[in-house]
Image (tube, grey):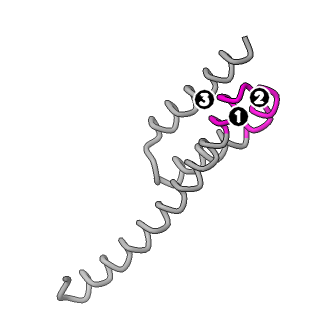
Amino acid sequence: MASHKSAIKTHRQEVTRRQRNRNHRTRMRGVIKKLRQMLEAGDAESAQRQLPATLSIVDHTARLGAIPVKTASRTKSRLARALNKLGA
């Protein structure tokens, strides 16, 4: 455990940031899971409506630093590709 003032504060900040990042990642994973379930069910119409909101949440999570930007890009690309494959 930290023993001096600055280390105690740093630890407190890390705990807060870790919890905040976890919340953002959990929210993102939930909407991605919903979209993937729509794609697996073959529901292209509702997946098409859900895609912009999902991509927005993925972008937002990356912008906050909870996930790397390249991870967000890869995720968005795979989701869009899956939707296009379903529509074709």
Direction from residue 39 to residue 72 in the image, left or right: left
Does dot 3 land on a helix, a strand or a loop?
A: helix
Magenta residues span 35-52
**Residue 79 location (% of width, % of height):** 60, 29
Q: Tell me, yes or no, whether the highlighted magenta stretch contains residue 50.
A: yes
Viewer-proximal residue, 20 or 64? 20
Residue linked to disc 1: 38
Disc ID at residue 43: 2
N-term-proximal mark, 1 vs 3: 1
Q: Amino acid at mark 3?
A: Leu
* Residue at screen point 77% across, 25% down: 44
Badges 1 and 2: C-beta atoms under 8 Å apart?
yes
Viewer-proximal residue, 40 or 48? 40
Q: CA distance from mark 1 to mark 3?
A: 11 Å
Badges 3 and 2: C-beta atoms under 8 Å apart?
no
Q: CA distance from mark 1 to mark 2?
A: 5 Å
